Amino acid sequence: MFSQMLSVNRPILKCLKTLHNRATRGFSIGPAAQGAVSLKGRSCLTLKDFSSDEIKKLLWVSGDLKHRIKHEKQYLPLLQGKSIAMIFEKRSTRTRMSTETGFALLGGHPCFLTSQDIHLGVNESCADTARVLSGLCDIVLARVYSHSTLEELDKEASIPIINGLSDLYHPIQILADFLTLQEHYGSLNGLTVTWIGDGNNVLHSFMMTAAKLGVHLRIATPKGYEPEKSVILEAQRLSKEYGTQLVLTSDPMEAAHGSNVLVTDTWVSMGQEEEKKKRLKDFEGYQITMQTGSVAKPDWTFLHCLPRKMEEVDDMVFYSSRSLVFPEAENRKWTIMGLMVSLLTSYTPQIPMLKF
C-alpha cells in the first residue's frame, strides 16, 4: 500500500524533497517500522504507554500535517463528520485553542465543556459520563485535576481519551516540545535537555519520553520538589534501556552544564496558590538567566510551556533569539492535530520521515 502511495504521489514527493525551509529541515526516510505503526483506537493518557516507534510516528504525522496545511496550503478534511468533546476542569489558552481550531481545521466539530457545562463526577459519575460521550462523539480530550479521572473515563469509554493535562502528566505538551526541537536542531538523538524547576506533570512527561528519542535528561529541583518516586524509577529504567543519561540534582548550574536545551515551567501551578509565598522562597536561585546558559553548549535554546512568570526566566532569555517558546506554542496545534488524526484514522504521512 505504501509503495502504491509513493507511485501515485511521486510528483508531490519530488517537489517536497527540493524544499529547504525550516518546515522540512531534518526529514529523512526512516525505518519501515514507524510507517507500519497504527495507533487508531488508542487513548493517550501518558507517553509512558507509547513505544519509541509510536512516539516517532506521532511526531512524523504532526510534521506532515504542518507542512501540508501550513506551508503547502492544502485542505485536509481528515476528521470530517467526526466530533470531539473537550472537558476542561482547568482553564487554558494553548490547549483549548490548539485543540478547537485544529479539530475544526481538519473538518471536525469540537464541543467545549467547562465545569459549568458538565459537572464531572458530581451530578453524574465519570463512568456514566464516559458511556454517554461514547455515544455522542468520536473522541474526548479532558483537562483535569486528578489523573484518576482520566483513568476512569478511559476504563468506561469505548472511544479514545486524550489527556489534556492532569496532576501527573502533560503528554500533549511534550509532543510539541520535541517537534520544536526536531525542527530547530534537525534531529533529536544525542541532545541534552535540562529541566530547572518544579518536579511537576510536564517534567514527568519529559521523563517518560526523552530516553525513547535518544535524548539525555538533566533535572534540577529544590529539595522537597523532586519528581514522583515511581516516575523516577521508570525514567531510570528507560535510560538504561535506551542508553541515555539521567541526572537528578538540586543544583541548577550543575544541571545546565553542557546542555543543548534549558527548560522550565511555572513554580506555582493552578490549585497551589496558597503555597505561593513558600514556593517562591524555596525556588530562589532557580531563575533561568544568561548566566545559567553560560555553562550550557554554545547552541543552547530555551523552552517554556507558558504562561511564564518573571521569577522563572528573565526577559533577556525569554525574548532572546535562543528562546523557542512561541514556535513551541504554535506546535501545540500541529501535534494535537497529529495525535487526533493518529487515534481516529489510518492516515499515512506523505513527507519523508523525520530524522530522529
Image (cartoon, rainbow, N blue to C red):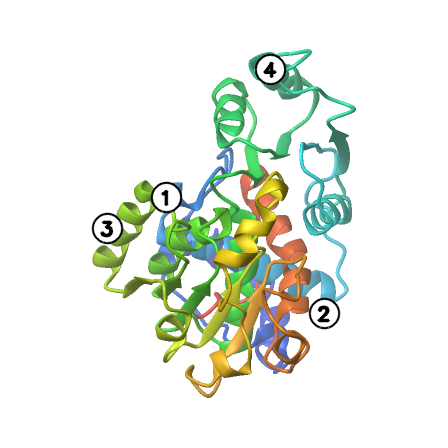
Q: Quadrant of residue 81?
A: top right
Disc number for residue 131 = 4
Q: In front: 340, or 276?
A: 276
Identify residue type, mark 3: Arg
Which marked residue is nearer to the observer: mark 3 or mark 1?
1
Which marked residue is nearer to the observer: mark 1 or mark 2?
1
> Please, what secondary structure does the residue beneath circle 4 have?
helix
Q: Which residue is found at the position 43% from the left and 81% from the top?
A: 296
> Please, what secondary structure does the residue beneath circle 2 have?
helix
- Give the residue at mark 3: 237
Identify residue type, mark 2: His
Disc number for residue 228 = 1
Chain-order first, disc 2 or disc 4: 2
Residue 73 placement (x, y as % from top left): 77, 64
- Give the residue at mark 2: 71
Does the CB distance between marks 3 and 1 fall below 8 Å? Answer: no
Chain-order first, disc 3 or disc 1: 1
Distance CA(mark 4)–CA(mark 1): 31 Å
Inspect this view and state whether residue 349 appears.
no
Q: Residues within 10 Å of mark 4 (few under 14, many from 20)?
A: some
Identify residue type, mark 4: Arg
Chain-order first, disc 1 or disc 2: 2
> Please, what secondary structure does the residue beneath circle 1 have?
loop
Residue 165 placement (x, y as % from top left): 57, 41
Chain-order first, disc 2 or disc 3: 2
**Quadrant in which the C terminus appears:** bottom left
